[in-house]
Image (cartoon, grey):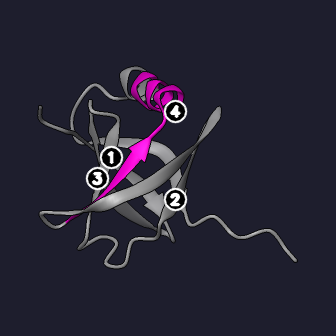
Amino acid sequence: MPAIICYVHADGREVQFRVRFSRRVAIPLSDWPEPPANLLLVCPGFVADLKLTGIFNGFAVFYVSSIAFEYIVDLMRRLCSTEPCRLPCVLSVPQPPPS
């Protein structure tokens, strides 16, 4: 099944964010050459934890929980009438708690 191509913000730049209906999202390695094990997707009204499942065909592929995936799809439905969609979300690497 094809992916829906979106863009989100990360470190002051736009990053391609491909949403697949297998509850996975993929980010091209050209946009994020050294993907971390986890990412946070912060959007209006929710935060999604993305977990790296592997590197495939030039993409870092991340798993998204079913609840977070439903929020992402709902946001795309409300805000995007054409592709690529520009979501008002920010990707960031979670910071460990202070020790």
Q: Amino acid at mark 1?
A: Val
The residue beneath circle 2 is: 39
Q: Is residue 32 left or right of residue 97?
A: left
The residue beneath circle 4 is: 68
Query: Which residue appears at 33% of the width and 46% of the height?
Result: 25
Residue at the extreme front of the image, as rendered: 53
Crowd around label 3: few <14 · some 14–19 · many ≥20 (10 Å)? many
Circles 3 and 1: CB distance less than 8 Å?
yes
Residue 26 tag number: 3
**Residue 13's spot in the image, x, y percent?**
42, 68
Q: Amino acid at mark 2?
A: Leu
**Residue 97's spot in the image, x, y percent?**
80, 68
What whole-number distance in Å separates the C-alpha atoms at marks 1 and 4? 11 Å
Crowd around label 4: few <14 · some 14–19 · many ≥20 (10 Å)? some
Where is 8 relative to 47, above or below? below
**Residue 77's spot in the image, x, y percent?**
37, 21
Report the magenta residues as a range.
59-74
